[in-house]
Image (cartoon, rainbow, N blue to C red):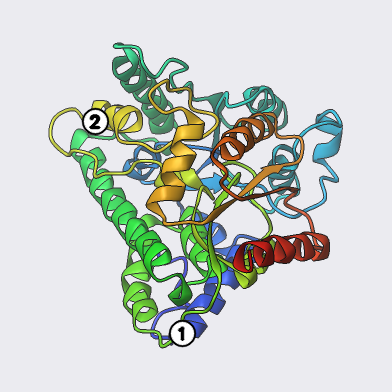
Amino acid sequence: MTVSTFDKWQDQPLDEILYESRELLEDMSFPTVQRWRESGGKVIGHFQVYFPEEIAHAAGALPFKLRGAPVEPRHADSRFGSYLCSIIKSSLELVLSHNIELDMFVTHPICDAARNLAAIWGRNFSYPCQILYLPQNANSSYAAQYLSEEYARLLKDIEVVVDRKVSADDLRHSMSVFNENRSLIRELYTLKREKPWLCSADEAYTLLAIGGLIPREEHNQLLKTVLPMLKSRANKQQDRIRVVFEGGFCEQPPLDMIRMLGKSCYVVDDDLLIGLRYILEDVSLEGDPLFNLAHAYLEKSTYSPVQHDLRKPKEKMLLERIKNAGAEAAIVTAAKMCEPGLEEQVAYTRTLDELGTPYFISEFEENMTSFDHIEIQLETFVENILFS
């Protein structure tokens, strides 16, 4: 299915492309999804963190990443208890308030709240709502086989929704599209690490995040156009420290907060929307496509607080991220009331203390509108490093 959902950026200069991308990202009416549905397309909504979007794409559906939103949970509040992270409530609110319409919803047991999300969702909507069970023991010799069978189960359910069979060649084609997408995102992050003055933190985030709102073919076209433009900018390097941002794996900080961080330092790597770039290498197109996707998730992936893999201790992986990015410090954050994030925050800061690595610690919530206190504290932190 070929549908153009986002064309305002085409044939525009770089600043206009970035402006239109930001406008799309912050538009809570989700016009690209509306255009997709108006053309007869199906939408598979999936909750954070990682989802094998290739499977939905191969079925001709639009995989839509539910990442919450800065909205008041007027309808969703009555479906949940009080002490929960914001993203759980705001994601359901977007659908209850008809900002977005789905044909299927998939969540993951990444925490207690997300584990119960499918059941709560299912009480309010008639379309399929289910849990995708990613392996709890990624080190088991049967993990890849188990996950490929779980993907096959998911595929059968999606086939019912779209009313068509998906072939192995369909899957391979989608995998090639997503291989190209991840390659382009890696190129964007390489630029961000090597020459962060050419692409600010909020610009990189915007270009990444809209990939969850539009077909990947369109995202690929956009990135292939924008990357050469970014590289040819005449921006001058400034005297800023290089930092890694950690804590954006699920709930997302407001775009204005990311922009604020970028004013004080160069954010040279992060885990923002890590699910969109969770797989680090091309997925093989030879052999069984579902097994290859499963193998890539287990063997060619990065890390997050919600994947339990003894080969990837989180503290060690954060230190590698800092080292590989050439960062001088870390910004260690967590969404308010996010149990996985807050638990890892303790482990991260203990390790950074032991090694004497400077870090700035904070919390955020997606609907925050004022960042003055964080900005003042961050500026003090940066000055202490610059002038020490």
Q: Which mark is residue 292?
A: 2
Q: Which mark is residue 13?
A: none
Say which residue label 1 marks.
236
Is 292 or 243 nearer to us in this picture? 243
**Residue type (three-letter) at the residue carrying disc 2:** Asn
Is 104 or 316 nearer to us in this picture? 316
The residues bearing labels 1 and 2 have C-alpha atoms spaced at a distance of 43 Å
In the image, residue 213 above or below residue 58: below
Q: Position of residue 12 (x, y in %)?
A: 43, 86
> To which quarter of the image does residue 78 belong?
top right
> To which quarter of the image does residue 146 belong?
top left
Looking at the image, is mark 1 or mark 2 nearer the viewer?
Answer: 1
Pointers 1 and 2 in contact (C-beta within 8 Å):
no
**Looking at the image, which residue is at 46% across and 27% down?**
313
Is 52 or 61 nearer to us in this picture? 52
Quarter holding the N terminus is: bottom left
Dot 2: element: helix
User: Seen in the image, is 235 located left or right of residue 187?
Assistant: right
